[in-house]
Image: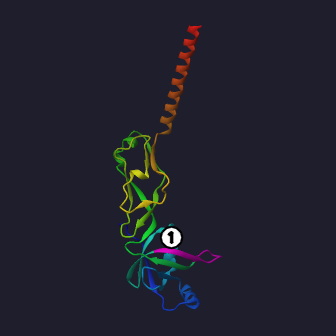
Amino acid sequence: MAESPELLATARAGTGKGAARAARREGLVPGVVYGGGDDPVAINVKFNELFKMLKAGKFLSTLLNLKIDGNDTRVICRNVQRDVVKDLPTHVDFLRLSQKSRINLYIPVVFENEDICPGLKKGGTLTVVRPEVELKVTASDIPEQLVVDLAEAEMGDTITISAIELPKGTRPMITDRDFVIANIQQPRGLAAGDEDEAAEGEEAVEATEDEAEATEE
């Protein structure tokens, strides 16, 4: 299972606009945790920690370990309200997750055995089309990464999502095609050489055909 990023929070006693403004003056962002069969809990998180995670990207699709006063809660962010002028976070909503919850997450792709890959050893280049893939996953069985084995990949091979073994109950969000993850491309010089050879071959065929036509005449 993937290790979830941790975000520290404290329970907020007061609610309403006054308590929220007081939290912001102290460098905190007010928020709420709801769902999962429990009552909503008002919280505060440190502005700097939240802002850093937001800048990293994919915050709304990242499973988090929200540590509220030392107690761990698995959550995913469902909304971040921002200041209309400064575009800075002013409030954040988190959804509690159970072990059976189904969520969308971006999972990174890693490539193994590049050192023995036949296509790469012949001078090919690994071109990564999707360094991560959005999956529908179960909260209790989230893969840490998707592994592509290049041990037998040849020059010109294309690796698609169907070549990757996914955990049971996991599926890609793109379902209408077997989309590309990566491919091993020929070096430009080699590809150009192949084109030249093909052109020479076509010229030879044309010359032979011309000779045959002249003989017939």
Residue at horizontal 43 percent and vertical 43 percent from the top: 157
Q: In the picture provided, is 150 more to the left or to the right than 16? A: left
Question: Where does label 1 land, which residue?
Answer: 60
Visible residue check, residue 170: yes
- Circle 1: element type: helix
Magenta-drawn segment: 76-88
Foreground of the two, 1 or 123 = 1
Q: In the picture provided, is 17 more to the left or to the right than 133? A: right
Foreground of the two, 187 or 2 = 2
Residue at horizontal 56 percent and vertical 8 percent from the top: 216
Q: Position of residue 80 (x, y in %)?
A: 55, 75
Residue at horizontal 39 percent and vertical 75 percent from the top: 98
Q: Position of residue 99 (x, y in %)?
A: 37, 73
Q: Quadrant of the N terminus?
A: bottom left
**Which residue lies most toward the right here?**
85
Q: Say if 107 sits above or below 6 in the image.
A: above
Q: Quadrant of residue 171?
A: bottom left
Q: Position of residue 110 (x, y in %)?
A: 40, 56
Q: Quadrant of residue 69?
A: bottom left
Q: Say if 69 sits above or below 48 in the image.
A: below
